[in-house]
Image (cartoon, helix red, strand yellow):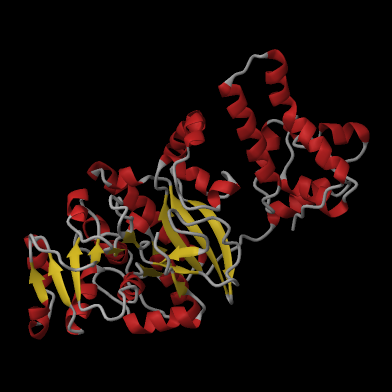
Amino acid sequence: MTAVIHPFAEHIAYYILFGIPALTIILTGVSSIGALTLYITYIDLMNNMGHCNFEVIPKWTFTLFPPLKYLMYTPSYHSLHHTQFRTNYSLFMPFYDYIYGTMDKSTDTLYETSLKKPQDVPQVVHLTHLTTPQSIYQIRLGFASLASEPLTSKWYLWIMWPVTLWSMVTTWIYGRTFIVERNTFGKIKAQSWAIPRYNVHYLLKWQRETINKLIEEAIVDANFKGIKVVSLGLLNQGEHFNRNGQVYLDKHPKLQVKVVDGSSLAVAVVLNSIPKGTSHVVFRGRICKVAYPIVSSLCHKGIKVTVIRKDEYDTLKKSIPTEDRDNLLLSTNSYNHKVWLVGENLTGFEQSMALKGSLFIPFSKLPPKKTRKDCSYLNTPAMVAPKSFGNLHACENWLPRRAMSAWRVAGILHGLEGWNVNECGDMLFDIDKVWEASLHHGFRPVSAPA
């Protein structure tokens, strides 16, 4: 594993080297935003690659262009600088180590060995996707400072628009699912894979077939590798999109990998987020798989649920047992209660009708657009990971540090508990059982408002 041991003189040299472009701009009075952006991007990319702790440069790269061996270092090359200390000094370019005889003798052997290392196969995979064009900076390969905070748009990221555009084109052309994060927790290894598409693509009907094919390929690949569980995150699941993942089971009935949409834990998180003593809630949001059991459970407990749109009221009423339907109400103009359960398509006008001090509790995968400063908004269903959950260095989209979406946690729980069942389509896992399992393994609700 690479370390951060550097002699003091090396830190000084780093600052001088990295400061050359800035000093040049100051001394000449001439600057280029494009050149400076490319320089910072190159330095950051190479520095992250050199310390990623696994070999990413394929052998064919140096076979096609042999001189590149002297112009670009590899992660295994730089790892020897941190373990042997007196070799492989060159920053990005091994050329100088070759000249001055400071190249470690085991460099080539370590490179070959690293490439032959068996592929690390996890037990659980969470299949997510990119959200906004600027979300690429949220992953660890981007900026560590941004990755450590919830996803927000920073002014200086607009300066990076050439890089952002390049990344969008690259992900579109590359068109393959890629690994975002590797984690360890207890007896399992977990990974997050990302579909190379953004939120906007999931809204386009002509993109559905392509995206579903990418999801299907990822599930089949996971099955081939012997992965136990694949959880579907964000928009990779949906009733109208892929019947909450059921289409993949119908197409591949012999799949050994279990497909989990995580709806049961999302329901549990929402139900346990409602303040104790609440006797009445307001409901507004697109009806989804999670909405039905939430409303049904509340009505069964004797909590009144006021729905503010008739079409949603009629849809929900069909799923409520006859003996509980008296607790489901319809009101289009009176909202005298401060707890709101909200999903997709919540409008600013509807938020404006809430009482001052109201609490908005999302049950959707994507957060609502907040328009009220005098009200509180909870995060989308999520849980804080225990401290023993390793390598969780980047925030998951808009969630705070070490918080994970309920849909992602559900997949991990299925792997930990060995539940050999699918949870997709119309299937819903035991809500109480999955909630108790999450607490047993150290996961805790995100209690603070977003």
**Residue at the image point whose x is 42% and y is 40% from the top:** 133
**Residue at the image point whose x is 54% and y is 47% from the top:** 146
Rendered view: 446 above or below 158:
below
Q: Residue furthest right?
A: 101
Task: Using the image as rendered, state which of residue 125 and residue 433 is in the foreground.
Answer: 433
Task: Using the image as rendered, state which of residue 436 and residue 373 is in the foreground.
Answer: 373
Instruction: Report whether 359 appears left or right of 123.
Output: left
Residue 364 in picture, x, y percent from top left:
29, 61
In the rendered view of the protein, which quadrant contains the C terminus?
bottom left
Q: Is residue 66 visible?
A: no
- Rendering quarter of residue 357: bottom left
Residue 375 in picture, x, y percent from top left:
30, 59
Instruction: Report whether 114 appears left or right of 231.
Output: right
Rendered view: 322 above or below 238:
below
In the rendered view of the protein, which quadrant contains the N terminus?
bottom right
**Residue at the image point whose x is 40% and y is 68% from the top:** 406
